[in-house]
Amino acid sequence: MMTGDWIDVGALVEIPLRGARTIKAANGEEIAIFRTAGNRLYALVNRCPHKQGHLSQGIVHGEAVTCPLHNWRISLSTGEALGEDEGCVPTIPVRADAGRVLVSRVAMLAMLAAA
Amino acid sequence: MDFQGTGIGAEDRDDASDTVGTQRLVVIGNGMAGCRAVEEILARDPGRFRITIFGAEPHVNYNRIMLSPVLAGEKSFDEIVINDAAWYADNGIDLVAGDPVVAIDRAARTVTANSGRTVGYDRLLIATGSDPFIIPVPGKDLPGVISFRDMKDVDAMLAAADRGGDAVVIGGGLLGLEAAHGLSLRGMKVTVLHLMPTLMERQLDEAAGWLLKTELERRGQTILTGADTAAIVGEGQVEGVALKDGRTIPASLVVMAVGIRPSTALAREAGLAVGRGIQVDDHMVTSDPAILAVGECVEHDGQVYGLVAPLWEMCRALADGLVAEPSGYRGSVTSTKLKVSGIDVFSAGDFSGGDGAEDIVLRDAARGVYKRLVLREDKVVGAVLYGDTADGSWYFDLLRKGDDVSSIRDLIIFGQAFAQGGGQADPKAAVAALSDDAEICGCNGVSKGKVVAAIQAGACSLDAVRATCKASASCGSCTGLVETILALALGDEVESGPKTICPCSSFTHGDVRREIVAQELRSIPEVMQKLHWTTPDGCSSCRPALNYYLLCAWPGDYVDDQQSRFVNERLHANIQKDGTYSVVPRMWGGLTNPRELRAIADVVEKYDAPMVKVTGGQRLDIFGIRKEDLPAVWADLNAAGMVSGHAYGKALRTVKTCVGSEWCRFGTQDSTGLGVKAEKMSWGSWMPHKFKIAVSGCPRNCAEATIKDFGVICVDSGYELHVGGNGGIKLRGTDLLCKVATEQQALDHIAAFIQLYREEAWYLERTAPWIERVGIDHVRRRIVEDVVGREALTARFLFSQSFSQDDPWAARAAGKHREQHAHLGEFRPLEILAAEGAR
Ligand code: SRM
Ligand SMILES: Cc1cc2nc3c(=O)[nH]c(=O)nc-3n(C[C@H](O)[C@H](O)[C@H](O)COP(=O)(O)OP(=O)(O)OC[C@H]3O[C@@H](n4cnc5c(N)ncnc54)[C@H](O)[C@@H]3O)c2cc1C
Ligand code: SF4
Ligand code: FES
């Protein structure tokens, strides 16, 4: 594992199954890290493509999260709105290793640069 | 990676051989992989090597996976030996058992064992397996704390079981559960501590994990999930395990089965390339061309394995590369089975879903079966089977081959026999082909002929079929079949059935509520299993509903599922469009005082709240609080005696009052006082939707009681009780329920009405549409006419309130669910760049 490419942002047990936690970036932007019932990790920029709702606060089901503000369903793997709605939120590579949560450094830097 | 060709070639090799025509092969590790590799080599070229095997254990090679049946008393050690002493002798193998190798000298090409014995090699094979991972807690070295890896551990467990008493197994994975099973069969009282929320979470999804836990509990084991070990306690001998939550579980034996680590110390000291395991190429050659490695101790292509199937494939590639045509190992796909008698569990591949993945779920509650297949691009990528694993190997085969299964997509979940039998790929055709006396509904014994007869007699919808012949009216597992019969009989004329709770289920809200009570279902996974949910973990519509129904059915017993709550109820505050929250403390009956007002004013200033507003519900709303600050805000409000106003909840909101007889010249009764009493009685209760009460002191009705869920209008002779009003989206005036004489009677009726609503309404149905649906007469009958029934409702409400009147804000202010108010971490790129520069 090349640690330089991945940033350790915390312990996996801190994210509840079917739940999410957030990472606060230096510029105020937030990343939401989701853990599904199937124990899979996903990371999205914490802004709903509809009206910037905090996706981290939505209900996680299957591989999707329902936005808490107006119930859009967002795919955790692609960041795209599901069903009738249209829109997309950036995703960030994330993985678990030895009980730690690692996010892609390059993607985080790119996200900061774009914001 | 490929280490071949980086060092010496074959011509350099023969210098150290001391026997003509043979080279020396030394194997470190007399376990499953080491011996299998030797077998594979001998099968290809029996004369090539003179072989010495070093084994740390004082045994011949035995089948490690059968230690579980040995512990359970189903097998003896002799029965699990793979290679007996004769095998070593017949093949001229020198076995040095009970003497571990302690050093490898790569320059001299020798290995040295603990006893000092040194042996030279031309080729060295490292097959040291894994070491159990011991969690570094105080007390881990106490006598009585063991792992589960070899025969010595089994002997220690058997000795402990002879003495009886309590055993704790730390780790609810495959190994831990097999240890727990064996110990409990041997008469010990076993508790399994598992850090994660569900058992075997790496092999099973939540639904199967729940079924497994239920079955093990039924067999008498105690399973504690989310249990984090703080220390192992005892004086000179283990006496118990202390958890981080403060509990201590007594134990005279503690088995740690939390995981394994490749055993790489020897290789690392010898300077071989080691990552998570000893790194090998496709021919199991390490970074030193004279040294090979195989089994659990290796890392191939970034992967390490903890099961035997990959070893067999590795050993084949190793032998091919060493003495025959190199074939190359390409990694393994693995499947898991739990070896606990009477519990069938199978899992394979990737069942966590993901990109474009499609779930097929089959639940058969009566047989305790759960099957889930995950397909991606028409291929099976994962499978979890519980209760019926007969088709596990078929699914695993489809998975490994990557077969396109689109032609059997509709039937695949029923298994190989059904999906491939008779070429009936169309489920409609399969149903059409059923004979008239084929049983459709097992619960009510209804044949296909009876269903067809009911339809021909006019039952044109699922509901009508249920009502007339009872097919699919009980557990519902045959709903799909009945729908197919309806479609076959009527074509397009099928009337759509009643609205189901959500697309995850074929049950209506009413069905679900009834079955939770009738079948005593006590958790969300249990409801989903017994009522045949078609998704593994529901959706954002059904989960909050199920959470509420269970909470209502089992007060004091059911543990709320935070992940099934809408954000407002999870955070006990209303989310705003900018992601901040509003905070509304309770002001009983709309009354307040200087201390409360001062505390609110202080909070507004201290947290820079951009706005504070008088609400339409007679209290104050503080806006713009960040989720991180909520606990501190609540602590400040608590300090002034205020509790949550539940302005965010499907719960009692406000009790609006007018000034009443105490001040008003028209007031007939103390409406303010009654309002405060009603609010003190009802606050904190979870309900199908929000619930508002108002009490007006006279028919002028200044508190707008006739558009509330429950409205009281005071008159000279008593209290008029009104129900089912709504001032919201669709205006509805209340219906008069009855008139009572005393304040206490009014309170008793409020409690009974709320409880009836809590028990009968559907989730997210306010009292107005609920009463329109069931009729005011029904409500009057239950509450006014049936006095005994009313008293029982009131008692049930007060009982459930005894568990729900703890202020949720106080708990949060004291640190409960801290994680919901804090970020997991922060990302400051400048610091990271600086740290990297410093490296
Ligand atoms: C704050 C307040 C407006 C105000 O500033 O006065 C308010 C604010 C909201 N109302 Fe209301 N309602 C408020 C009194 C009312 C009233 C008046 C009353 O209670 O006397 C009504 C009509 C009466 C009724 O409920 O029958 C009312 C009918 C609604 C409705 C429609 C309900 C319906 O059944 O038709 C909604 C939408 C819903 O619940 O789905 C709603 C939803 C909302 C929500 C929760 C919208 C949302 O989901 O975020 C607003 C939350 C703002 C916040 O963050 O606090 N609010 N809302 C009032 C809070 C009262 C309190 O102290 O708790
Ligand atoms: C209780 C139990 C149940 C299991 N059930 C299953 C199952 O159902 N299905 C499945 O696929 N897998 C199962 N496994 C896993 C399976 O047993 C292992 O994957 C397999 O044994 C690994 O083989 P190995 O040769 O790499 O390691 P091992 O079989 O552990 O062999 C390594 C040997 O090397 C020895 N050794 C280590 N260091 C030295 C040294 N320095 N000098 C000399 N000798 C040394 C060790 O003492 C050991 O005997 C189970 C394991 C256990 C413990
Ligand atoms: S009336 Fe509409 S905008 Fe105003 S508080 Fe209620 S929900 Fe929000
Ligand atoms: S902001 Fe997410 S649905 Fe509207």
Image: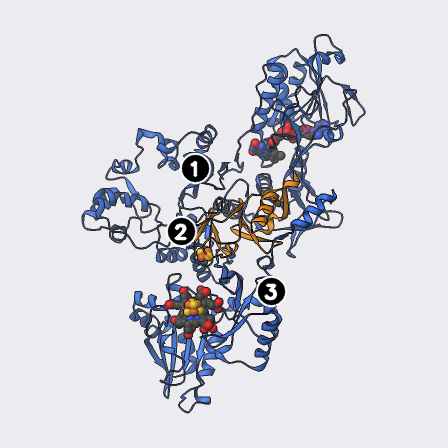
Chain colours: A orange, B blue
Residue at 70% x, 29% y: name it. B273
Same chain assignment for discs 3 and 1: yes
The residue that appears at 62% across and 12% down in the rendered structure is B45
Question: Image check: B687 left or right of B237?
Answer: left
Which comes sooner in the sequence, label 3 or label 1? 1
The residue identified by callout 1 is B375
Q: Mark 1 packing: few (<14 Cα in 10 Å), some, or many (20+)?
A: many
Q: Residue furthest right?
A: B116
Looking at the image, which residue sits at the far left?
B457
Residue at 57% over, 54% down: A29
Q: Which residue is mark 2?
A: A85
Determine whether, in the image, residue B446 is placed left or right of residue B255.
left
Q: Amino acid at mark 3?
A: Asp
Spatial CA distance of label 3 from label 1 is 44 Å
Badge 3, how many Cα within 10 Å: few under 14, some, many 20+?
some
B173 vs B481, left or right, is right
Q: What is the chain letter for disc 1?
A: B
Q: Quadrant of ligand 1?
A: bottom left
Q: Nearer the viewer, residue B350 or B348?
A: B350
Q: Secondary structure at mark 1?
A: strand
- Could you tell me which secondary element the residue under label 2 belongs to? loop
- Identify the residue under disc 3: B629
